[in-house]
C-alpha cells in the first residue's frame, strides 16, 4: 500500500479470531482504498497461523452501504472488486459478516461472499441497483438464488427494496441475529463457534426454488416496468443462475451489467439520483443559515389542494389550523381528509389510532384570525390574483411577526402577491402538485424580496414532509407549467393539421409519459381556466366546454368514457376538430410520430433553455427533477434537459427551426458545441 492510500480498513485480533474493520465515512462505500484495504487485511489474516476465523464488520453508522458511485465512469483504481470478493469466498478459514445499519448493493455482495452473516435486528439488507438502472454486478444475481432461493432473489433484484433483518433471517440470508449493542462480541463468538464447521463458500451451494416465479413477476409488474431495461436484465441473470454453472452465470451477469452500465437508461437514472440531492442546495446561501422555527402550520382553503397539503403536515406531527369561508366547505374538506386516512388505514398504512391522532392535530376555523399563532401559513384558494392579494393583505394584519406566508399558486406572480403585504421578505410560493398528499414535487418560488432564511426554511420544510423541493424563480408557470404550455399549444395545432387526440397521446405514452396532453386535459378537467361563456367559441376546447365535455368527470372530453372511466375515441370530437379545420382553411394531412415528438417535446427543451438563461431555475438538473417528480417524465430518460443531450441538441435546434420556432440562444449555443445541458 502506497503512502498516499487512505487507511480505511484495519485489523484487530481477539484470540484466534481476526476482526477486519472498515471505516470509510459516511457510509463505508466500497471506494478503491477500501477494496485495497480488504485485500491487504484478508491476505494478512489468512497468512496468520494463529487466526482460525475472520469477522468483517464496519465502524460508524452502517455496514458497507454500497459502491462508491462517484467512481462510476472514472479510470479504475485499486484491486478489482470481483477479485477481492472471490478471495474472501475462497478463504480457507470461516468468514463472518457482522451487519448493522444497511448492507446494500456491493455491501450485500460483500456479505454474500462471507461464509456466514450475523446482523442486528435493526439492519436492512438489499440490492437496490435496479433503481439506478443497474444490476448487482459482483455476483449478487448468482449468489442470492443459492442463499435465499429463486423467488426471493428475483424479487429482491428486480424491485430493489431492502429487507429487514428478521425477514432476511427467515429467508436464510442472515444466519443469526445479534444484540443491538453487542454485535462485535456476538459476531466473534459466532465465528469461534464456526471454526469446527469451517468455510461455506456460497458459490458451492445449490440454487433452489421455482423459476416460474420470474414470469409471474414480469406479469405482475408489467405496468410499473414499462420502458425500463434493468428489471428484466436482473431477472434474466437470476434465471441464468438456475441453468448455468456458477462461473458461466457470473460471465452472463457481467455482460448484462456492462450493457446497462454503458447504456443511456442507467446514465439517466444516476443523473436523477444526483440531481435530486443537488436540487436541495440553494446557490449563494451559507450552509449554516439559521432557519425559522416552524411548529404550527395554517392552511387557507379546505378544498382538494388545501386538504391534501394539510395531510402532508399532519403525517409528520405538525399541528394545523385550516380556514374556510363556509362551514359546509370546511366540513366537506375535513370529511375528505378523514376518508383518505381511513382508506389508508384499511390498507394497513396507518393504525386507526394514528388516524385519530392526526385528525386531532387539526383546528378548523371560519376566521383568518385563527391563524395568528401559525409559523407558516399556506394559501390554497383558486387561481385568481385579486382573491389572493386580498387574502395576503388580510394576512399581513393577522399573522405574527416572522411568520412565513406562502401561496400555492401554480402560475401567478409571487412578487405581485407579496406586494399586497408590508413584509414581502416573508412571502414566497410553495407550489404543491395534485394530489398534494401523493405527488413528491414541491416548487418553492423565490420572490424578488423573499428573505434568504424564508427560502431556506421552506426548502427544509419540504424535505421534512417528504417532498422533493426545487427552487424556482418568478415567471408565468414557474418551471414545470411554463414548459408544459408550448407542448399543449402545439398539441392543439396538430389536431387542426390532421392528428387525432389518440395519436398525439400515444406518442407521449410510448415515450414513457404516464399520459398524453389530451388524456391529461380530460383527467384535470377541460374546463379548468375556461371563460365560462358557451356562446364564445374561439377554440376546440371552447367548443368541448360549451357542449359540457369537461373531461372524465362528465364522461366526455377529448374522449368518451364509460362508467369505469375507460376512454374511447369520440366521433363528436372528430367532427368538432373537422369544423375548426375547415373554418381555418387548413388542409388535413398525415402527421408522423417523429413530427409529434419534434413539435411537442422539443419545444419543452427550448423553453427550458430560456428558463435557465433567465435564471428562473438554478441548474438544468433542477428542471429534470421538476419533470420527473411533478409530471411523470420517464426516469430512464433523465428529464427533458438530460434527454436533450441524448437526443442531440443540434438535432433538436435544427428541427425547431424547420418547424418555425424561435430557437433559444442557449440551445443554439449547446447545438453549435453538440453539447448537452
Image: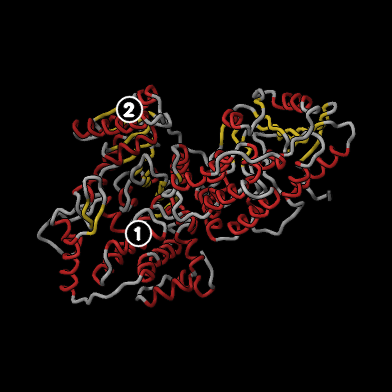
Vertical position of residue 320 compared to residue 591: above or below: above
N-term mark: 2 or 1: 2
SS category of the residue bearing label 2: strand
SS category of the residue bearing label 1: helix
| 328 and 300: which is toward the camera | 328
In the displayed structure image, the side of residue 562 where residue 273 appears, left or right: right
Task: Say which residue appears at 76% left-offset and 49% top-offset.
Answer: 83
Look at the image and tell me whether residue 668 can be seen: yes
Vertical position of residue 402 compared to residue 432: above or below: above
Measured as percent of width and height from the top left, residue 249 is found at 66, 51
Measured as percent of width and height from the top left, residue 128 is found at 57, 44
Quarter occupied by residue 60: top right
Vertical position of residue 335 compared to residue 251: above or below: above
Quarter occupied by residue 326: top left
Residue annotated with mark 1: 484
Measured as percent of width and height from the top left, residue 421 is found at 31, 44
Amino acid at each position: 500500500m502506497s503512502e498516499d492510500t487512505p487507511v480505511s480498513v484495519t485489523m484487530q485480533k481477539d484470540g484466534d479470531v481476526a476482526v477486519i474493520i472498515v471505516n470509510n465515512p459516511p457510509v463505508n462505500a466500497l471506494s478503491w482504498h477500501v477494496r485495497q484495504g480488504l485485500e491487504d487485511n484478508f491476505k494478512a489474516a489468512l497468512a496468520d497461523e494463529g487466526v482460525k476465523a475472520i469477522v468483517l464488520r464496519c465502524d460508524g453508522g452502517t455496514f458497507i452501504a454500497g459502491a462508491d458511485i462517484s467512481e462510476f465512469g472514472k479510470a479504475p483504481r485499486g484491486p478489482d472488486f470481483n477479485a477481492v470478493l472471490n478471495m474472501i469466498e475462497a478463504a480457507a478459514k470461516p468468514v463472518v459478516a457482522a451487519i448493522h445499519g444497511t448492507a446494500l448493493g456491493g455491501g450485500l455482495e460483500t456479505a454474500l461472499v462471507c461464509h456466514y452473516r450475523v446482523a442486528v435486528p435493526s439492519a436492512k439488507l438489499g440490492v437496490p441497483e435496479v433503481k439506478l438502472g443497474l444490476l448487482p454486478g459482483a455476483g449478487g444475481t448468482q449468489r442470492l438464488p443459492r442463499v435465499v432461493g429463486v423467488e426471493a432473489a428475483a424479487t429482491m433484484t428486480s424491485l430493489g427494496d431492502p429487507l429487514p433483518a428478521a425477514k432476511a433471517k427467515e429467508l436464510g440470508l442472515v444466519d443469526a441475529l445479534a444484540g443491538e449493542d453487542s454485535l462485535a462480541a456476538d459476531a466473534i463468538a459466532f465465528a469461534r463457534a464456526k471454526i469446527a464447521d469451517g468455510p461455506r463458500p456460497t458459490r458451492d451451494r445449490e440454487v433452489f426454488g421455482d423459476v416460474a416465479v420470474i414470469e409471474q413477476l414480469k406479469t405482475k409488474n408489467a405496468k410499473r416496468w414499462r420502458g425500463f431495461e434493468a428489471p428484466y436484465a436482473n431477472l434474466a441473470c437470476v434465471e441464468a443462475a438456475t441453468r448455468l454453472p456458477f462461473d458461466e452465470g457470473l460471465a452472463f451477469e457481467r455482460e448484462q451489467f456492462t450493457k446497462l452500465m454503458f447504456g443511456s437508461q442507467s446514465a439517466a437514472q444516476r443523473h436523477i439520483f444526483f440531481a435530486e440531492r443537488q436540487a436541495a442546495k440553494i446557490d449563494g446561501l451559507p450552509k449554516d443559515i439559521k432557519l425559522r422555527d416552524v411548529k404550527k402550520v395554517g392552511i387557507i382553503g379546505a378544498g382538494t389542494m388545501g386538504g391534501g397539503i394539510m395531510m402532508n403536515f399532519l403525517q409528520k406531527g405538525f399541528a394545523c389550523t385550516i380556514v374556510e369561508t363556509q362551514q359546509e366547505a370546511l366540513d366537506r374538506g375535513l370529511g375528505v381528509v378523514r376518508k383518505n386516512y381511513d382508506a389508508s388505514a384499511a390498507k394497513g398504512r396507518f393504525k386507526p389510532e394514528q388516524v385519530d391522532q392526526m385528525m386531532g392535530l387539526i383546528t378548523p376555523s371560519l376566521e383568518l384570525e385563527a391563524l395568528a399563532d401559525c409559523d407558516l401559513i399556506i394559501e390554497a384558494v383558486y387561481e385568481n390574483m385579486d382573491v389572493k392579494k386580498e387574502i395576503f393583505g388580510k394576512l399581513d394584519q393577522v399573522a405574527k411577526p416572522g411568520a412565513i406566508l406562502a401561496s400555492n399558486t401554480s402560475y401567478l406572480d409571487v412578487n405581485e402577491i407579496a406586494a399586497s403585504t408590508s413584509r414581502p421578505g416573508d412571502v414566497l410560493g410553495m407550489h404543491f402538485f395534485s394530489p398534494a398528499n401523493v405527488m413528491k414535487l414541491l416548487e418553492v418560488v423565490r420572490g424578488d424580496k423573499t428573505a434568504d432564511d424564508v427560502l431556506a426554511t421552506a426548502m427544509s420544510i419540504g424535505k421534512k414532509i417528504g417532498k422533493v423541493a426545487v427552487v424556482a424563480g418568478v415567471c408565468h408557470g414557474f418551471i414545470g407549467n411554463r414548459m408544459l404550455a408550448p407542448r399543449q399549444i402545439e398539441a392543439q395545432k396538430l389536431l387542426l393539421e390532421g392528428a387525432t387526440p389518440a395519436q398525439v397521446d400515444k406518442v407521449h405514452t410510448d415515450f414513457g409519459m404516464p399520459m398524453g396532453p389530451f388524456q391529461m386535459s380530460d383527467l384535470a378537467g377541460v374546463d379548468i381556466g375556461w371563460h365560462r361563456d358557451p356562446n364564445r367559441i374561439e377554440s376546440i376546447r371552447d367548443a368541448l366546454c360549451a357542449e359540457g365535455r369537461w373531461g372524465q368527470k362528465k364522461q366526455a372530453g377529448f374522449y368518451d368514457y364509460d362508467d369505469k372511466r375507460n376512454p374511447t375515441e369520440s366521433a363528436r370530437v372528430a367532427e368538432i376538430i373537422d369544423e375548426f379545420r375547415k373554418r381555418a382553411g387548413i388542409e388535413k394531412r398525415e402527421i408522423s410520430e417523429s413530427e409529434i415528438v419534434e413539435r411537442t417535446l422539443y419545444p419543452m427543451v427550448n423553453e427550458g433553455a430560456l428558463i435557465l438563461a433567465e435564471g428562473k431555475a438554478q441548474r438544468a438538473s433542477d428542471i429534470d427533477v421538476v419533470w420527473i417528480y411533478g409530471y411523470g417524465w420517464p426516469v430512464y430518460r433523465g428529464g427533458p434537459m438530460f434527454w436533450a443531450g441524448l437526443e442531440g441538441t443540434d438535432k433538436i435546434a435544427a428541427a425547431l427551426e424547420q418547424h418555425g420556432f424561435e430557437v433559444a440562444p442557449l440551445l443554439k449555443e449547446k447545438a453549435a458545441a453538440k453539447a448537452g445541458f
